[in-house]
Amino acid sequence: MFKRFRRLRLNENLRLMLEENYLSVNDLIYPLFVVDGKNVRNEISSMPGVFQLSIDEILKECKELERLGIKAIILFGVLEEAKKDSVGSDALNEEGLIARSLKEIKRAFPSLFVITDLCFCEYTDHGHCGIIDPIKQTVDNDLTLEISAKQALIHARAGADMIAPSGMMDGIVGTLRKALDEEGFENLPIMAYSSKFASAFYGPFRDVANSSPSYGDRRSYQMNFANGKEALLESLEDEKQGADLLMIKPALAYLDVIKDISNHSKLPLCVYNVSGEYALLKAGARLGVIDYERVLLETVMSFKRAGAKLIISYHAKEVANLLTKFA
Ligand code: PBG
């Protein structure tokens, strides 16, 4: 005797009835890259369909997201080189690129949920994620915490709906929670990039964000991709420090990590389907070697199956369209 699993697979309606995981447009978060200027729409060669946009163009994009039913964006600033310095001052300025953009987006789209990526690599001339210790030639953790708290308040005052610190500094979640609470932002959630690996999958992003380190790499603060248990430790520590959501990044090569964290934490999980993952699928489509739409849906569903609630993806608009197409 053996079990006949196929009994439950032979009928389309029954297959749908027994589907364990669902994708919803509510799960999607779309990344946007803002630059200074007007009418700017620079497409990134490795990421077809992804643009650096000036604020006026960002507003058009938000309108489109609203039409598609996408509820949230994560916003990145792409600063011109001349405005960068060793401590990323533009990110600490009430009139800086991100602060101005946030205010305009929230004014035009008050209900769009705007998440900010809190980091310094897009604003420093050396391209690292914080203040450099000149002797050790690596990012100084605790000094970076101090300026991160300042950056968080800039985002909060400009209208951010959630803050996502991505620099992988130890103690960042507790530091931001305290700073926000002290200034009356106790209801502003923090999404911790709790498991962010030092990954080659971020390559195309650094083209979009102009944020490659000018020397060295990020391995002294981002995680070693050989480690899974450490990701769990990082995540549980962020939970303890007061994170409201946890994030795992990249997504596709780290499904085991997502599953493990979802088995050990009750917090909602988000995954970041990063630039390199997007670029690979696009390249596959261009070469005609995959059925792009089906591979995309299968990929995104794998994040849900692994335990993610939310998905940050450059594919978000395409997925939203596919959901209506297949509904
Ligand atoms: C850092 C940051 C990075 C990404 C998001 N936030 C790059 C990095 O750590 O080098 C990568 C996202 C992607 O590859 O899509 N601010």
Image (cartoon, rainbow, N blue to C red):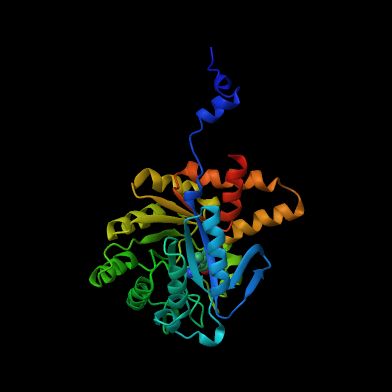
x 57%, y 67%: residue: 60
Is 110 above or below relative to 317?
Answer: below
Query: In screen coordinates, is 236 left or right of 217?
Result: left
Whole-percent x and y of residue 222? 46, 65
x 35%, y 71%: residue: 156
Whole-percent x and y of residue 224? 48, 60
x 54%, y 30%: residue: 16
x 53%, y 44%: residue: 302
Q: Nearer the viewer, residue 135 or 237?
A: 237
Q: Residue furthest bottom?
A: 82
Q: Nearer the viewer, residue 97 or 39?
A: 39
Whole-percent x and y of residue 65? 54, 58
Q: Which residue lies furthest to the right in this view?
A: 288
Is 280 above or below relative to 217?
Answer: above
User: Is residue 218 among what the camera can see?
Assistant: no
Whole-percent x and y of residue 74? 48, 63
User: Is residue 3 among what the camera can see?
Assistant: yes
Is 215 above or below relative to 13?
Answer: below
Count of labels in the image:
0
